[in-house]
Amino acid sequence: MGKPKTAPVVLAVAPVSRGIGFALFEGPTKIIDWGVKEARVNKDVVCQRQIESLISFYQPDLLVMEQFDEGTNRERVAKLNESLAILATLKGVDVTRLPKDEVHAVFGQFGSTKKFGIAKTIGQWLPELQHRMPRYRKPWMNEDHSMAIFEAAALALSYYYINS
């Protein structure tokens, strides 16, 4: 008989323009896997396949993703999130959506309310991710590719914090 789980295994995803970032946790202090899966063409189909593969391999208890408001300017990403939620449900994985405001409120309690500050806090909490820490983004710079990992990790950690 296996060891009882103390916290749900959480797969958090953060779709971005070049693909999808993910972070897989087995409790709030144990990150198992993370990365950015690229999708240059047929982005939605490629992202769905990649997340389906992660779900099949890791069999998480929960998929955590961002909740989008009606009329968001990220309509494609909102539709992708919805299709990923349906996919997870069909695979027997529960789905939770967190609004960005809630994530910012959680990390605001630790002094971080902006994207880079949240990533920096996560890097301090999870040394495994420090080598992926994005550089500070100036207004004329593109967002660092690895920021998607930290966005996904922020969703998962916020879920654990809210439900602890």
Image (tube, rainbow, N blue to C red):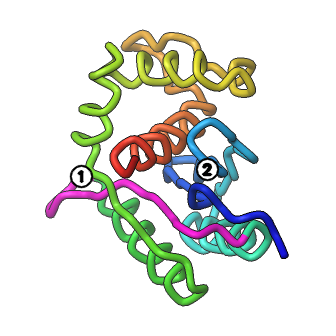
Q: Which residues are magenta?
A: 59-73
Name the residue that disc number 1 marks.
73
The amino acid type, in three-letter code, at marker 2 is Phe
x and y, in percent, of residue 23 in the image? 62, 47
Name the residue that disc number 2 marks.
22
- Dot 2 falls on a residue whose secondary structure is strand
Q: What separation in Å lies between label 1 and label 2 (alpha carbons)?
A: 22 Å
Q: Main secondary structure of the magenta part?
A: loop
Q: Residue furthest left?
A: 70
The amino acid type, in three-letter code, at marker 1 is Asn
Q: What residue is drawn where x is 79% and y is 70%?
A: 57
- Vertical placement of 46 versus 140: above or below? below
Q: Specify the quadrant of the image occupied by residue 90.
A: bottom right
Q: What residue is drawn where x is 45% and y is 47%?
A: 160
Q: Specify the quadrant of the image occupied by residue 115.
A: top left
Q: What residue is drawn where x is 50% and y is 23%?
A: 119
Does 6 sit left or right of 104 as displayed? right
